[in-house]
Structure formats: structure tokens, C-alpha cells
Image (cartoon, grey):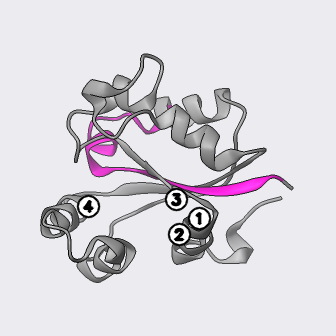
Amino acid sequence: MGELTFSIIKPDAVQNGKIGDILKMITDSGLKIKATKMIQLSRVQAEGFYAVHKERPFFGELVEYMISGPCVVSVLEGDNAIKRYRDLMGATNPADAEEGTIRKAFGASIEANACHGSDGPDTAAIEVPYFFSSLELVN
């Protein structure tokens, strides 16, 4: 079994019909989708998920944005999956992202940047079970 990482296709990309395009980029990169589902985050879920940013000035806007529409959450697997998915996502600001990245292709702004991914093993270990039980992860 390879390393696991967590992915969110954010409300802007879902609203713009980019779920299939983004999932294809993920699988084309060699990462496997272990679990995926569409959800509508509640305020409590979004505040809990982004609790690490609670003291940051953008926290309120981030929560409002993340509850503004459905998201697609996934668990990805592969060798070095965390770094590989972060590279595939591209820079947080789509204007700074490299060609061929999800954010360059589909991101509109630093906030509406199409996707989220775990930034390290400790984060992935928290984010995956936040949305998925072990029964939902397919081998």
C-alpha cells in the first residue's frame, strides 16, 4: 500500500463542472482514488476542518466559501502521494501556478483555487478520517 493523502475539489470547481477533469488529472498522474464522495459541508464541519487557521484573518471568509456549495472529497494513494498531489495542484495562487497544474487550469483566485490537498503526513492522518471511515477506503 502506498502513502495516502486527502483531496477536496472546492465549491468553485464543482460549480464550474470540473469534477471529472480534476479526477482525470489525478488518475492520469498515477495516483489511485481510494474513496470519493460529494458532500455539502456544514459550518461546524468547515470550522472543525480548518481549525488550524482559526486565528488567521481569512478564517471566516474561508469557512463561508467552503460552505457555499458542494465539494468532492477524496482519498488518494500512491508512492509519495502527498508531494505528488501537491505538485499536481500547483501554487496556492493560480496566477503563480505552473502550466499543467489543477490550479493553473481551473483556479480563479487564492481562495477559489479549485482544490485542497494534505500538506504532510500528520495532516493527512487527520484529514482522511475527518471525512472517511476505514470501511469506505477501497483496496
Most foreground residue, 45 or 57: 57
Which element type, helix, strand or loop, lies under badge 3? strand
Q: Report crowding for label 2: few under 14, some 14 to 19, many 20 or more residues within 10 A (C-alpha).
A: some
Mark 1 sits on what residue? 124
Say whether residue 7 is magenta.
yes
Q: Specify the quadrant of the image occupied by residue 50.
A: bottom left
Q: Amino acid at mark 2?
A: Glu
The stretch in magenta equals 2-20
Mark 2 sits on what residue? 127
Quadrant placement of the C terminus:
bottom right
Q: Specify the quadrant of the image occupied by residue 59.
A: bottom left
The picture places residue 83, in percent across and down from the top left corner, at 61, 43
Q: Amino acid at mark 1?
A: Ala
Mark 4 sits on what residue? 66
The picture places residue 8, in percent across and down from the top left corner, at 44, 53
Q: Decide which of tag 1 and tag 3 comes sooner along the chain.
A: 3
- For the point 72% across and 65% down, the residue is 137
Disc 3 to disc 2, how far (Cα)?
14 Å
Q: Amino acid at mark 3?
A: Lys
Q: Nearer the viewer, mark 1 or mark 3?
A: 1
